[in-house]
Amino acid sequence: MILVLRALGVGDLATAVPALRGLRAAFPGETLSLAAPARLTPLILSVGAVDRIVPAAELEPLDAAPDRPRLAVNLHGSGPESHRRLQALHPGELWAFASRAAGHHDGPGWLDDEHEVRRWCRLIRYYGVACDESDLDLLVPAADVPAGVTIIHPGAESAARRWPPDRFASVARRLVTAGHQVLVTGSQQEHDLCVRVTALAGLPASAAPCTGLTELAALVAAARLVICGDTGIAHLATAYRTPSVVLFGPVSPARCGPPADRPYHRPLWHGTHSARGDLPGPVHPALLTITPEEVLTATTKALQDHRPSPTAVSPPS
């Protein structure tokens, strides 16, 4: 059995898809288990590479994982904490970045400013497994959602990555005037923020629907456009080749942005360096320099550059 650790969020899972598929292709006869949050199950099923999901929170021991997997693969972090979580299972082999603190001296060195997709592909290539960094598409889950809407997603995990609600509302108002059907999405914890944006934009309460991950993924796949901050839904837009405008603040799109060869994904960033994206406190200054007018211009360009392509549909079971 192969056990892979990636106990993070939506965007983190999406950036590991090429590496997961590389592992699946390299070990076709093995059971591939993924230790990840159970809430990501609909998205994990859409990867099409995982046989078993091991529920796992970010910092907790892997109590539900089987002991002594033949191979453990750390697609979670640089160590030492994540390395030790896998070492505690006594795997036959551990594939991970080199970590002196964890006593793991094999593996490539960690590069702070590397793009997340490239990082995990580089790791498994080090161990002889082929990986296609462009293999980012996800299967569309079965859900009854409207097609052709423009999604505005104002939330993000950290305050530093949240563009102000009034600016999102300004963009929403002008898009509605231009003929867009706008929906404002967010997690259950972000619903009050979504309601605030719809109210500022003069939209009805129905424009802020409550959606689970299955519905959100299907909605993005069928959408006309996604406008959001540097958060998980941006990676869903990439996975479903839906035009997007993504607003970056503390972290450069060179670290976690959409593929550079897809002009219909438009990253906006006015920063000068890469940094961690979980900074506490107010909105990052680089994010505040992005104006509604700049976002609207980027939406026009993203839609003009989009050439629709068929996306596979596979209802999760």
Image: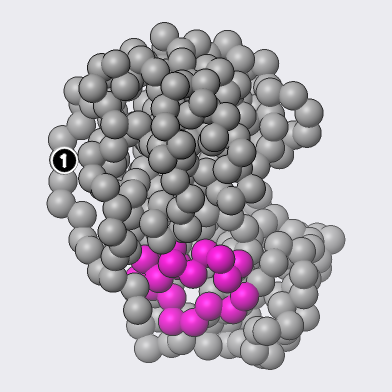
Look at label 1 and name its amino acid: Pro
Task: Mark yes or no: residue 93 visible.
Answer: yes
Task: Mark yes or no: residue 229 visible.
Answer: no
Residue at point 68%, 29% (across, down): 160
Which residue occupies the foreground of this view, 155 or 170? 170
Q: Is residue 170 left or right of residue 190?
A: left
Write down the quadrant of residue 315 in the picture: bottom left
Residue at point 64%, 48% (across, down): 189
Q: How is the image coloured?
A: one colour
Q: Position of residue 186 (x, y in %)?
A: 52, 43
Residue 234 higher or lower than 177, as above or below: below
Q: Position of residue 296 (x, y in %)?
A: 36, 15
Write down the quadrant of residue 276 in the picture: top right
Residue at point 42%, 32% (across, down): 204
Residue 105 within the segment the image draws in magenta: no
Write down the quadrant of residue 148 in the picture: top left
Residue 273 higher or lower than 192, as above or below: above
Q: Which residues are magenta?
A: 37-55
Crowd class of label 1 (few under 14; some 14 to 19; many from 20; radius 10 Å): few
Q: Which residue is mark 1?
A: 308
Q: Position of residue 185 (x, y in %)?
A: 47, 41
Residue 53 within the segment the image draws in magenta: yes
Q: Position of residue 205 (x, y in %)?
A: 46, 36
Q: Quadrant of the C terminus?
A: bottom left
Residue 29 higher or lower than 219, as above or below: below
Residue at point 74%, 59% (across, down): 79
